[in-house]
Amino acid sequence: MKRIVKEIINLDIGKVEEKVSLKKNTTYKVGGNALAFVYPNDIDSLIKLLKYLRNNNIKHMILGNGSNVVFKDTTYNGIIIKLDILNKYKIKENIIIAESGVNLIPLSFKAIDLSLEGLEFACGIPGSVGGCLYMNAGAYKSDMSNIVKSVKALTPDFKIKIFKNKDLEFGYRDSFFKHHKDYIVLEVTFELKKGKKEELIELANDRKRRRLESQPLEYPSAGSVFRNPPDNFSGKLIEDLGLKGYSIGGAKVSEKHANFIINYNNATASDIRKLIKYVHTRVKKKYDIDLFIEQEFID
Ligand SMILES: Cc1cc2nc3c(=O)[nH]c(=O)nc-3n(C[C@H](O)[C@H](O)[C@H](O)COP(=O)(O)OP(=O)(O)OC[C@H]3O[C@@H](n4cnc5c(N)ncnc54)[C@H](O)[C@@H]3O)c2cc1C
């Protein structure tokens, strides 16, 4: 394993950190170490890294802001690729072109500041542009699919491909990329509308206030655990089972919002995983509803 890290350093493609804590790099604040985190300097460096990893059959994945993933407590025996250096964006009139490492929250506030309407649903979503596109992240009856014009991605054979919105297979928290893990989102073009700045600020402030009231943002979490089933709310189903406050180890079903699991007391990844599975089983048993887990378990 030391050899792999050494060989990656010798590729001279960007910063390499050995034995990095996943606990420190995910919003649940759980997980063991990864063999290494690599921060490619640019797309050519990324391609060089991917070729090396693939030729040597080394496990790897892209990690955005780690706000929708649950690793294990044991070592992730592979390479975590971080696209933090791809963090530039350009705005021309109502078009924003953002690289995948851009954080969506500051970008949505920037759009509001420029009186651009459409991204305000994302003011509370702590993901990267790449991670949010992959998830088709959304809130308040909107999501990425409503504002994405096109996406620039790296294909498995290292070509650059432009996807138009209609080719992105968007669905509820779903996109083409969720089903094609060997494609990498490099850049997203958003098409927004001209709006009224004061109204957009008011909306963002009102939603922030409501989120603070209704979500346990004072604890580490990864947002909603389960997708809402058709015509129902996961939070309500879980609350009606009396599971608010139910805990396993340091993980607990939030008392504020039953569809959030929080790390309230030094939880392990195993505590979080067990609690998610426990809630899932209880809902299935009582209502015969197979809740879909929105968060990703990574082994
Ligand atoms: C407090 C809180 C509130 C939240 N609220 C919401 C909400 O309102 N709505 C909502 O939808 N989500 C919400 N989330 C969940 C989360 O922020 C989103 O799912 C977000 O899209 C995850 O982005 P990320 O960059 O953190 O992705 P990560 O968790 O780092 O990664 C998720 C997946 O995306 C893949 N990925 C990341 N970048 C790329 C890329 N460039 N190319 C290809 N694949 C990539 C990863 O490999 C991984 O499989 C919330 C989370 C928290 C902690």
Image (cartoon, rainbow, N blue to C red):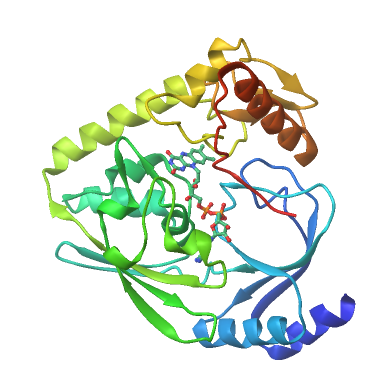
**Residue placed at 50% from the left, 22% from the top?**
235
Q: Position of residue 55 (x, y in %)?
A: 72, 87
Q: Is residue 189 visible?
A: no
For the residue pair 162 and 45, the one nearer the viewer reads as 162
Judge left or right: residue 74 versus residue 240. Answer: right
Q: Position of residue 257 (x, y in %)?
A: 52, 21
User: Which of the two residues, 39 or 276, is positioned nearer the viewer here?
Assistant: 276
- Apparent side of residue 87 relative to residue 74 in the rendered image (left or right): left
The x and y percentages for residue 227 are 48, 36
Taking 219 as reference, is 139 above or below it?
below
Asked whether, in this view, residue 80 is left or right of residue 153, the answer is right
- Residue at 50% x, 25% y is 234
Closer-to-camera residue (290/221)? 290
Query: Would residue 11 be visible to someone looking at this image?
Result: yes
Q: Quadrant of residue 290?
A: top right
The image quadrant that residue 20 belongs to is bottom right
Q: Residue at x 49, y 80 (%)?
A: 155
